[in-house]
Image: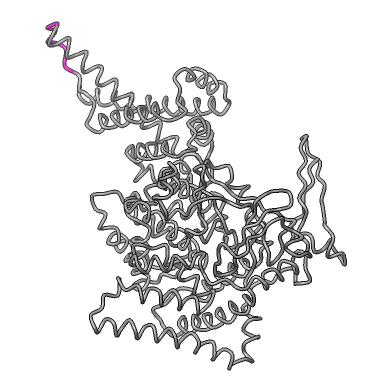
């Protein structure tokens, strides 16, 4: 029997007037274990406050002086800071090494409030953009902001959880051990002995965020309407960010995100997701498992523990790929304060407030785009941008295709996978002003997530290339994912003008074997299923043609060798020497040999088990059907070739 809490979204209709009672659902399960998790007590606060731009606009429409005061409060210190930078430049002071100005920038963003702190946090992960002195100061925005008084934090705990901190926790740190843009964290211990992190929301947070979002949204709308070169949906992008920030201010929502993240990605090797203690969690207070660890941006400290920081970045990249391209539920704020190297060598994810989702069509579109970028297929890449809603369907793609070629021209002679995401993004951003591109709202958080992660990776290893690390996973998905979109993409990748491109298959197999969860047997099973289906008829027929060409090449080489021996060694000069395989056929044979070698070196390939696998394939109905289809196609090709040879013989006799 398992006892579990109903999700908060399901509780409101059940609770009625009993708002302080725990609601529990009992589910029968075939197990001897029982898991009991109490739902959080719900305070008198509204169940959930969602971002609603129309309501916010109506709220501030009648408060012009309050809006003006906020605009001036932002402009005055910002202009003063910018004037100081300009004046330093006039006096010949090197800005990038000026710690005084770096401290002022950090203090300015802190003064302006949570929305601007978020901008600083994003910049703090980009050592390729921000000078080291500024980077050091901006990094403090992640968890070293000025805290608010303990009295307010303790008041929130009592209001949200219905008891004082001393009544709930056995221990609680006298001061916050970290303070971020939306809340501050105390270290505590439960009465049952578990060490926990207690996250308490900042006071008046919603009001501060709301007025800034209102002003920025009005500004975005003005720019979008008046500046013709800006085609992107700036208002939509800001609304997407607003949705995420409002969700981040709801700690029950964050707890649900953490549990969903664990369900989807907790099984990945060396990924750790902390536990949420629902009995001590509500809208403004979150209690979760305490994680002992070191920030990823401290590689020397990590190395002293005998842990490879670069390996943990690789773990993070693989986890991000599954977030973005497999399940679509992704961490949109992976800055160094939210990623820790644990003392036992795992990558721990923290802070699940800012999460987002990608629809299946967008996930498949991103996979196809990566494949087309790496393989320099810019015609198909232009079509991908239409599918991903960067271009409207009626856009003339003719001038855009050569523009893509120019963007990636600096990788000539090297793999595009060796480029970094930041450089690709910057180059593509330049195109968006020249051609009718528009940035869809969902894309902003994706690129924020990827660029932030890449920034951490570059901090640890300047030569780290996220795209290069990603391609083995993408190759594996192309070979194993049965989705129609990816099967079509696989066909387009392997065939051009009806001709099979063996080099592409070789490259796919070589890259796919580098993916941690690549399964050789799964590739065989799904390959047979696909090739024996109607969807796989095109590839099946072309593969049969290539197989026949290969057999023909082998037979020609064998006959050539045999006739050569008869003429040169035995002396039967009356026998004409048979021609060997053509250059093209010889190349096909070389590709087949290399592919067989790749398969033999692939994890999961075991010669001792090969006979068993072959036997299973033979009795598999799909495999028998595929064998019959191949045999029929082979017979048709052989008869056609025999007829052509007979006709050719008759013409020579005449």
Specify whether residue 492 is in view.
Answer: no
Please say if 187 is above or below 629. below
Name the one closer to the observer, 314 or 274.
274
**Farthest residue toward the bottom?**
65
Along the viewing direction, whichever of 256 and 408 lies nearer the viewer: 256
Q: Main secondary structure of the magenta part?
A: loop
Rendering coords of residue 186 (x, y %):
62, 61
Left or right of residue 540, residue 404 in this image:
left
In reply to whether residue 145 is colored magenta, the answer given is: no
Residue at image location 41% in from the left, 52% down from the top? 370
Percent across and percent down for residue 179 are 56, 67
Residue at 52% across / 50% down in the picture?
293
The location of residue 363, given as percent across then percent down, is 51, 54
Residue at the extreme top: 570
Q: Quadrant of the N terminus?
A: top right
Residue nearest the observer in this picture, 606 or 516: 516
Vertical side of 390 occupied by 23: above or below: above
Specify whether residue 312 is in view: yes
Q: Which residues are magenta?
A: 570-577
574 within the magenta span: yes
- How many callouts does the rendering have? 0
**Residue under the image location 42 percent in, 65 percent down:** 124
Q: Position of residue 7 (x, y in %)?
A: 74, 56
Colouring chosen for the image of the structure: one colour
Question: In the displayed image of the protein, which residue is found farthest to the front?
Answer: 174
Image quarter of residue 21: bottom right
Quadrant where the C terminus lies? top left
Residue 356 shown left or right of residue 412 in the figure: right
Q: Is 404 rendered above or below residue 414?
A: below
């Amino acid at each position: 029997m398992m006892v579990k809490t109903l999700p908060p979204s399901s509780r409101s209709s059940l609770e009625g007037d009993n708002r302080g009672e725990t609601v529990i659902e009992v589910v029968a399960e075939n197990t001897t274990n029982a898991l009991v998790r109490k739902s959080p007590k719900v305070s008198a606060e509204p169940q959930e406050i969602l971002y609603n731009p129309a309501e916010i606009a109506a709220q501030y429409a009648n408060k012009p002086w309050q809006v003006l005061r906020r605009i001036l409060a932002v402009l005055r210190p910002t202009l003063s800071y910018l004037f100081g930078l300009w004046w330093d430049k006039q006096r010949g002071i090197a800005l990038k090494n000026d710690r005084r100005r770096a401290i002022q920038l950090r203090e300015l963003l802190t003064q302006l409030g949570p929305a601007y702190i978020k901008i600083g946090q994003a910049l703090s992960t980009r050592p390729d953009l921000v000078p080291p002195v500024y980077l050091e100061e901006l990094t403090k925005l992640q968890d070293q902001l000025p805290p608010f008084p303990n009295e307010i934090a303790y008041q929130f705990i009592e209001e949200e959880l219905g008891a004082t901190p001393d009544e709930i926790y056995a221990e609680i740190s006298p001061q916050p051990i970290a303070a971020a843009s939306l809340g501050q964290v105390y270290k505590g211990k439960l009465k049952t002995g578990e060490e926990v992190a207690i996250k308490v929301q900042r006071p008046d947070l919603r009001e501060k965020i709301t007025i800034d979002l209102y002003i920025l949204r009005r500004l975005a709308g003005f720019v979008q309407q008046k500046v013709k070169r800006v085609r992107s949906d700036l208002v939509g992008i800001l609304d997407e960010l607003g949705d995420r920030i409002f969700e981040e201010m709801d700690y029950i929502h964050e707890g649900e995100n953490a549990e969903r993240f664990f369900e989807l990605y907790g099984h990945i090797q060396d990924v750790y997701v902390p536990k949420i203690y629902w009995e001590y969690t509500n809208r403004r207070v979150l209690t979760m498992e305490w994680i002992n660890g070191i920030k990823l941006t401290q590689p020397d400290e990590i190395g002293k523990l005998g842990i490879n920081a670069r390996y943990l970045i690789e773990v993070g990249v693989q986890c991000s790929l599954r977030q973005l391209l497999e399940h679509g539920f992704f961490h949109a704020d992976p800055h160094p304060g939210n990623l820790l190297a644990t003392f036992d060598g795992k990558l721990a994810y923290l802070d699940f407030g800012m999460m987002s989702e990608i629809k299946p069509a967008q996930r498949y579109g991103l996979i196809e785009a990566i494949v087309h970028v790496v393989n320099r297929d810019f015609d198909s890449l232009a079509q991908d941008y239409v599918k991903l809603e960067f271009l409207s369907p009626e856009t003339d793609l003719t001038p855009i295709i050569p523009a893509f070629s120019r963007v990636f021209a600096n990788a000539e002679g090297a793999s595009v996978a060796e480029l970094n995401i930041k450089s690709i993004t910057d180059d593509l951003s330049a195109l968006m002003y020249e051609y009718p591109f528009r940035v869809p709202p969902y894309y902003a958080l994706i690129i924020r997530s990827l660029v932030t992660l890449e920034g951490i990776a570059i901090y640890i290893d300047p030569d780290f290339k996220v795209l290069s690390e990603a391609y083995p996973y993408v190759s594996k998905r192309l070979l194993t994912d049965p989705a129609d979109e990816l099967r079509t993409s696989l066909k387009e990748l392997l065939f051009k003008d009806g001709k099979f491109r063996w080099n592409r298959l070789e490259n796919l197999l070589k890259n796919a074997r580098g993916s941690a969860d690549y399964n050789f047997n799964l590739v065989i099973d799904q390959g047979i299923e696909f090739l024996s289906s109607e969807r796989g008829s095109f590839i099946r027929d072309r593969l049969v043609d290539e197989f026949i060409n290969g057999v023909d090449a082998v037979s020609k080489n064998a006959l050539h060798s045999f006739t050569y021996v008869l003429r040169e060694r035995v002396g039967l000069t009356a026998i004409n020497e048979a021609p060997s395989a053509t250059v093209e056929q010889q190349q096909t044979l070389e590709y087949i040999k290399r592919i067989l070698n790749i398969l033999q070196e692939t994890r999961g390939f075991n010669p001792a088990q090969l006979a068993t696998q072959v036997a299973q394939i033979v009795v598999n109905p799909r495999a028998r059907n595929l064998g019959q289809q191949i045999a029929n196609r082979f017979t048709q090709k052989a008869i056609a070739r025999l007829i052509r040879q007979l006709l050719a013989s008759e013409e020579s006799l005449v």
